[in-house]
Image: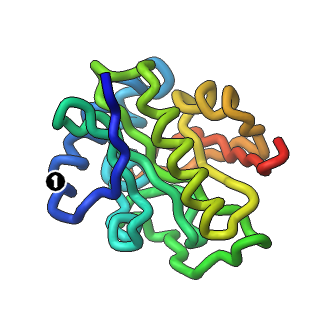
């Protein structure tokens, strides 16, 4: 089946928020508790509309249906939705800083069918075209195997506090173009 990757639009935000929730609840249940998922949805795990406004948040479309989303950023924020208080919208310097790979979510019935890989390659190509020579991300435990498969290495393991008293393990990963 043919997959098209294109920029997301702001009018798709409500649909993307639903896709994110479906993805988290179905695909991350093996790595996170119900309480962790509840505490992270909409904050650590959620939609960042700044990426859409920047034109760097992408959707994967198959047979007219959005089956995944993910993006890259030339801003300092490593992960999280609009509501994350630790956001840093300062710009990154191409060739000096690593572009941020951000917020990948796949429809559960399309998991492990190459959707995430297609979005990842499109993000890396776009960031490279913008002058970036390396990439960094805050990966979920669920996403680590995908990113490791494409040359990302673990830099550190983080524990992100959530508003419900839980914490969410996140893995900071990076990749240089020579990796």
Q: Quadrant of residue 68?
A: top left
Q: Residue furthest front?
A: 2
Which quadrant: the C terminus? top right
Tell me which residue sits at (46%, 28%) in the image: 32
Residue 111 visible within the image: yes
- Please say if 133 is above or below 143: below
Q: Residue furthest bottom?
A: 90
Position of 132 compared to 102: left or right? right
* Residue 160: x %, y % from top left: 56, 50
Tell me which residue sits at (56%, 42%) in the image: 121
Which quadrant: the N terminus? top left
* Residue 36: x %, y % from top left: 42, 36
Residue 24 visible within the image: no
Q: Quadrant of residue 154?
A: top right
Tell me which residue sits at (19%, 30%) in the image: 63
- Please say if 140 is above or below 1: below
Residue pointed to by mark 1:
14
Position of 59 compared to 159: left or right? left
* Residue 29: x %, y % from top left: 40, 22
């Amino acid at each position: 089946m043919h997959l098209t990757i294109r920029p997301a639009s702001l009018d798709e935000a409500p649909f993307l928020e639903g896709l994110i929730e479906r993805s988290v609840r179905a695909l991350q249940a093996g790595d996170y508790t119900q309480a962790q998922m509840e505490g992270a949805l909409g904050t650590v795990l959620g939609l960042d509309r700044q990426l859409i406004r920047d034109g760097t948040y992408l959707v994967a479309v198959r047979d007219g249906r959005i089956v995944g989303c993910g993006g890259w950023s030339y801003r300092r924020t490593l992960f999280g939705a609009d509501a994350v208080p630790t956001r840093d919208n300062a710009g990154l310097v191409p060739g000096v800083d690593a572009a941020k790979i951000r917020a990948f979510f796949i429809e559960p019935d399309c998991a492990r069918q190459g959707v995430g890989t297609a979005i990842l390659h499109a993000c890396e190509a776009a960031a490279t075209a913008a002058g970036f020579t390396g990439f960094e991300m805050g990966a979920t435990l669920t996403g680590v195997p995908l990113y490791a498969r494409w040359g990302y290495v673990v830099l550190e393991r983080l524990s992100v506090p959530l508003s419900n008293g839980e914490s969410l393990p996140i893995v900071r990963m990076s990749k240089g173009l020579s990796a």
